[in-house]
Amino acid sequence: MIKNCPVCKSKMKIKEIECTQCHTRIIGDFSLDDLQDIQPEIMDFIKVFIFTEGNIKKVEKIMNCSYPKVKNYLKKAKEYLGVDYPEEVDQDSQETSEVLDQLSQGEIDLEEAIKLLNKGEE
């Protein structure tokens, strides 16, 4: 499918769609799917992430990359898809993520991580 005008390079839009079975036509202004513009590397990550049901260890193994790289892919996918949560939910998620990062990098032990995570629930 042509995404950009071959003459001026502007974005193309769809004016008409038609059913292949009954030939019903709908005429209007339709935009191309935003996911067509996503970077292939990020789309590959999203597919692997869904395939592994969010298991970061499995993502690391399949994509042959490190934990920080997976977190970076996840951040980019989140930004691209416009996934945003209220600030307090995002803050809790950020704190949890930081504790888990410290644990995975051996900066703290499991007992300390549990204390820190439980402190956020008080």
Image (tube, helix red, strand yellow):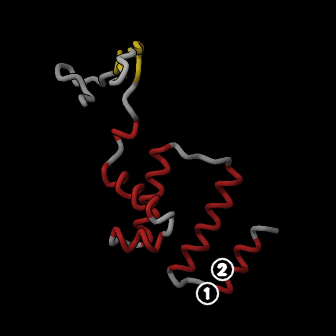
Q: Quadrant of the N terminus?
A: top left
- Residue 103 position in % (x across, y down): 57, 80
- Residue 59 position in % (x across, y down): 42, 68
Q: Quadrant of the C terminus?
A: bottom right
Q: Residue visible at 33% across and 72% down?
A: 64
Query: Disc 1 residue type?
Result: Asp
Q: Residue under label 2, please give it.
A: 113
Q: Residue under label 1, please give it.
A: 109
Q: Residue visible at 68% across and 61% down?
A: 92
Circle number at residue 10: none
Can residue 52 be seen by looking at this rendering?
Answer: yes
Above or below 52: residue 33: above
- Residue 18 position in % (x across, y down): 35, 19
Q: Residue visible at 70% across and 73% down?
A: 117
Q: Which residue is farthest front? A: 22
Can residue 17 be seen by looking at this rendering?
Answer: no
Above or below 77: residue 115: below
Marks 1 and 2 in Cβ contact (< 8 Å): yes
